[in-house]
Amino acid sequence: MQFKGVLRKMKTELTTQVQYFMDFEGDFVHVNQLLDKELSITFTGYQCLNCEQDKKIYRQGFCYDCFYETPRAGDWIMKPELSKAHLGEEDRDLEYEKKSQLQPHIVYLANSSNVKVGVTRKSQIPTRWIDQGAHEAIEIVEVPNRYLAGIAEVALKPHVADKTNWRTMLKNEIEDVDLKETRENLKQYLPDEVQEYYLASNKETEIEFPVLEYPKKLKSLNLDKNPDFQGKLKGIKGQYLIFEDNTVFNVRSNEGYKVNLEILGSN
């Protein structure tokens, strides 16, 4: 069985165990059902997620030109504290920026390789945590716009990590942490204009990923260097596919790549 299409980050659903789905040209693949099966991934070209042209992907699924033009890749996305829609100031497209920035946002703690602080739209909870491979997470504040979330994150960064060690996350070298206690310890560092939005009663969310076998050593699949890959799928965590030979493939990092995905069967 073969599927063809442009890679986009896997869609997820949080049940007892995370359910993963990939969308290919008219076909919806339930990736959990591919565990323990031999898969073939063949790179066939590019398709920018903005202009849809066959142009080499630069970042975030966009070609070079689109990355610097589309409002979907503005600096405020990676640095929420740069958001200005609440002031009526445009970065690339004020209408788009108002729609994205002027909605409830969450500042959270997520534990994937270590406890980190992050920001996401409220509508992206728990998707954001799943994408980061967090096995536990908790909200700190819920604010009405992205700017307030950004300044809260900046204030907390000196006291807690803001990056995930993807290697540690994929090897499952993790420790459980009392996130409620960590949240309480961090409250004192929140900016005054954010203090009123502090969430004191939210409980931790625990997340279980569909992994049969964690890798011991990691080999990252690069489709530009290795356009034909075959391996047995042993797990899915974050946005990574984990294979029996310790190869890991970050689906989200390869957005905009056109591939053929073939299911060869199981041993």
Image: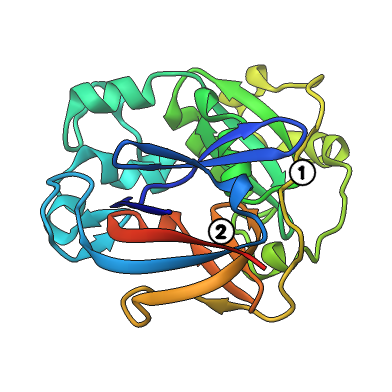
Q: Which residue is mark 2?
A: 240
Q: CA distance from mark 2 to mark 1?
A: 14 Å
Q: Is residue 22 left or right of residue 86?
A: right
Residue 86 visible in the current orientation: no
Residue sitting at x 67%, y 39%: 18
The residue located at (31%, 20%) in the rendering is 99
Residue found at x 59% / y 52%? 34
Q: Which residue is mark 1?
A: 208
Q: Residues within 10 Å of mark 2 (few under 14, many from 20)?
A: many
Examine the image and state in which quarter residue 35 appears.
Answer: bottom right
* Image location of residue 265, percent across then percent down: 57, 61
Q: Are marks 2 and 1 in contact (CB under 8 Å)?
A: no
**Residue 83: % across, % down:** 35, 34
Q: Against 166, is 251 above or below?
A: above
Colouring style: rainbow
Which quadrant holds residue 229?
Answer: bottom left
Give the image location of residue 94, x and y in percent: 19, 26
